[in-house]
Image (tube, rainbow, N blue to C red):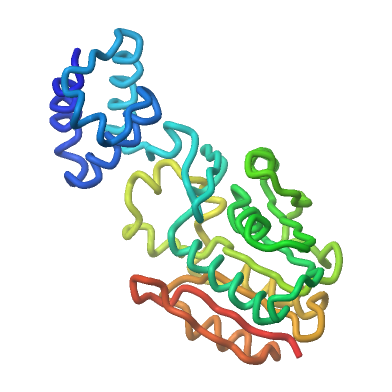
């Protein structure tokens, strides 16, 4: 089969499930991943002959896409903050909103250190792929960065991602909800914990609901701030003076999360919207 014939087949096979823009995105990703063809090549080489082996692989991928399996899991990788990350079904696929959180953390650390090289101790709680600490490590020097996750399988991927991106992170397996303390004192604590309530499941697309780890996504309706409460309590114990706490949050629970932090004595609380206009991030300080 030649390239233009496969593209027609690809579009017809997926048109009932995905919008055209997403199908095009899948197509270009697969052409580069499987056939080493850049986007321009797909235009300039319509008669490119796809080998029988590659065609079998591509048709298998089409079947997986028809079942709404995320393309990132199919190819085993994604990009976050301009960096490559391995992903599998034990890790959430990093989101653009979390890139915004990373940008905010980087900006605030630069202000905190006045752009000078200062040794800071940073902790990411619920690290998943390791996308937050690895992105910080690639963009700042003189950081002592640790990352916690409850899932040993996720930590395997996170460690591979640190090697892939040539950074040093201390990874710790820990169930944060049952932790009585953190491993040490930190200047900055960051967390993007599970925050989607069970009642919000109907808003979640099938490709997420049926594939991504529920342990990293969902919390009970009756206690949606369970992770935020626990992490804030631990931060009060082991955040350094004027240390900063950052959260990615449920867009519907911004005020509730702020109020919880106020009651615990945190100061300079900032609630920030993401690019889509949703309450998505919080920064606060422990004086």
Residue 223 versus residue 20: which sits nearer the camera?
Answer: 20
Residue 165 versus residue 233: which sits nearer the camera?
Answer: 165
Relative to residue 24, is residue 114 drawn left or right? right
**Viewer can see residue 156:** yes
Residue 148 vs 8, above or below: the answer is below
Q: Residue at x 63, y 51 (%)?
A: 130
Residue 23 versus residue 223: which sits nearer the camera?
Answer: 23
Residue 3: which quarter of the image? top left
Tell me residue 99's x, y (percent).
49, 62
Residue 177 vs 225, above or below: the answer is above
Residue 35 vs 138, above or below: the answer is above
Q: Residue at x 36, y 31 (%)?
A: 32
Q: Residue at x 59, y 75 (%)?
A: 107
Tell me residue 143's x, y (percent).
76, 63
Tell me residue 175's x, y (percent).
73, 55
Q: Residue at x 46, y 78 (%)?
A: 253
**Viewer can see residue 223:** no
Relative to residue 217, is residue 262 drawn left or right? right
Relative to residue 22, is residue 237 drawn left or right? right
Residue 202 versus residue 127: which sits nearer the camera?
Answer: 127
Tell me residue 23's x, y (percent).
23, 40
Residue 114: which quarter of the image? bottom right
Name the residue at the top extreme.
52
């Amino acid at each position: 089969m030649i390239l233009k014939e496969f593209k027609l087949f690809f579009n017809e096979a997926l048109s009932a499930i995905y919008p055209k823009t997403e199908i095009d995105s899948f197509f270009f990703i697969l052409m580069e991943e499987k056939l080493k063809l850049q986007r321009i090549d797909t235009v300039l080489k319509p008669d490119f002959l796809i080998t029988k082996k590659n065609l079998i692989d591509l048709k298998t991928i089409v079947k997986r896409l028809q079942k709404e399996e995320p393309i990132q899991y199919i190819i085993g990788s994604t990009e976050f903050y301009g960096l490559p990350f391995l992903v599998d079904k034990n890790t959430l696929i990093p989101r653009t909103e979390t890139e915004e959180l990373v940008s905010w953390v980087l900006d605030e650390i630069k202000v905190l250190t006045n752009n000078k090289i200062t040794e800071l101790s940073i902790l990411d709680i619920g690290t998943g792929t390791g996308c937050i600490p690895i992105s910080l490590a690639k963009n700042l020097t003189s950081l002592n960065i640790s990352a916690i996750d409850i899932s040993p399988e996720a930590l395997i991927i996170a460690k591979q991602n640190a090697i892939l991106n040539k950074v040093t992170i201390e990874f710790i397996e820990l169930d944060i909800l049952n932790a009585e303390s953190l491993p040490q004192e930190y200047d900055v604590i960051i967390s993007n914990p599970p925050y989607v309530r069970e009642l919000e499941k109907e808003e979640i697309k099938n490709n997420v609901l049926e594939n991504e780890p529920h342990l990293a996504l969902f919390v009970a309706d009756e206690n949606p701030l369970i992770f935020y409460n626990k992490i804030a309590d631990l931060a009060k114990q082991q955040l350094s003076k004027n240390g900063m706490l950052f959260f990615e949050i449920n867009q519907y629970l911004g005020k509730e999360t702020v109020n919880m932090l106020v009651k615990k004595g945190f100061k300079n609380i900032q609630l920030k919207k993401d690019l889509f206009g949703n309450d998505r991030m919080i920064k606060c300080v422990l004086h």
